[in-house]
Image: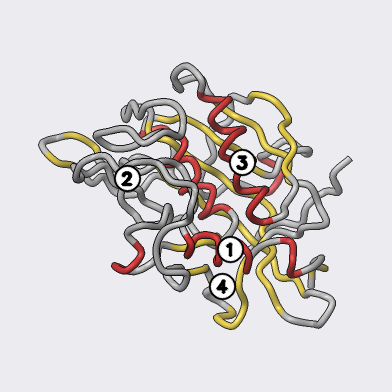
Amino acid sequence: MTPRRKAATLIACVASIALVLPLGPAIAQTHRPLGNPRAFAVYTMDEAPEALGRWDPCTPIGYRVNRKLGTRGAIADVKKAIHRVSKATGLTFIYRGRTSIVPQLAWADDAYPADTQLIVAWVRPTQTTLWPATISINGKDMVAGRGGSWHVHARDTNGRLWGRYNRGFVLLNARQKLPAGFRAIGPSGPRGRELMHELGHVVGLDHPGQGGRKQIMYPELSRRPGRWGRGDLAALKIVGAGGGCLTDV
């Protein structure tokens, strides 16, 4: 049984936006990570800028999926994307089943089921207060998804301060019908890549700068396949299990 969580005091990251933009021709898949290994950014806590955010690797992360507005293969893509996050970070995720919950901005800590720390949901933007201000082109909402986590304060075995994430969310725009899977496809890339991007925010990754266009965490959808770039992997290691267990302050 998962221990009951402390109430989160602040939102760590709710500024994840992946835009649907027309890009160049499709790029062939490759297994070799691409890009600059320094092309990454990780979240710090606004109230403690020296502290990074991450999940406690010694506590499994239970997750549920609201796929009511998702298309065929939605849950399978979520599971595969989470597996890729788990493999890169060493964090343990456990699928708890489906849910009808749509995460909201100002929820109390007990709004999630007791065994659930992460909810992935397909939504209409008007369904949640976590959706950003609309970015549209010719009347079409161009925001494909959003991801983030809430945190409390914690320390590792060396006394270093961290923001320990205790709840997270991934919201996918149900109006954006991205192709299922992780293969390179156009015009805006596969759904699996978008899920990996938003889950990157959930575990503590921010958007890289202009030099990070080959990274999944770059804030534009891409026709590239759903594979981490070199910068992505470097950042995922920083927020991963190698940092050791966390104890709440």
Pointer 4 residue: 45
| 185 relative position to 103: left or right | left
Q: Which of label 1 and label 4 is nearer to you?
A: 4
Pointer 2 residue: 221
Pointer 3 residue: 82
| 114 relative position to 106: left or right | right
Instruction: Please say if the residues under marks 1 and 4 sit with CB atoms less than 8 Å apart.
Output: yes
Q: CA distance from mark 4 to mark 2?
A: 27 Å
Quick one: SS at disc 3? helix
What's under tag 4, amino acid-wise? Answer: Met
Quick one: SS at disc 2? loop
Q: CA distance from mark 3 to mark 1?
A: 24 Å
Expressed as whole percent of the image width and height from the top left, the position of residue 118 reads: 64, 42
Whichever of callouts 2 and 3 sits on the residue coming sooner in the sequence is 3
Q: Using the image as rendered, state which of residue 142 and residue 10 is in the foreground.
A: 142
What's under tag 3, amino acid-wise? Answer: Ile
Whichever of callouts 3 and 1 sits on the residue coming sooner in the sequence is 1
Whichever of callouts 1 and 4 sits on the residue coming sooner in the sequence is 1
Q: Residues within 10 Å of mark 3 (few under 14, many from 20)?
A: many
What's under tag 1, amino acid-wise? Answer: Leu
Quick one: SS at disc 4? strand
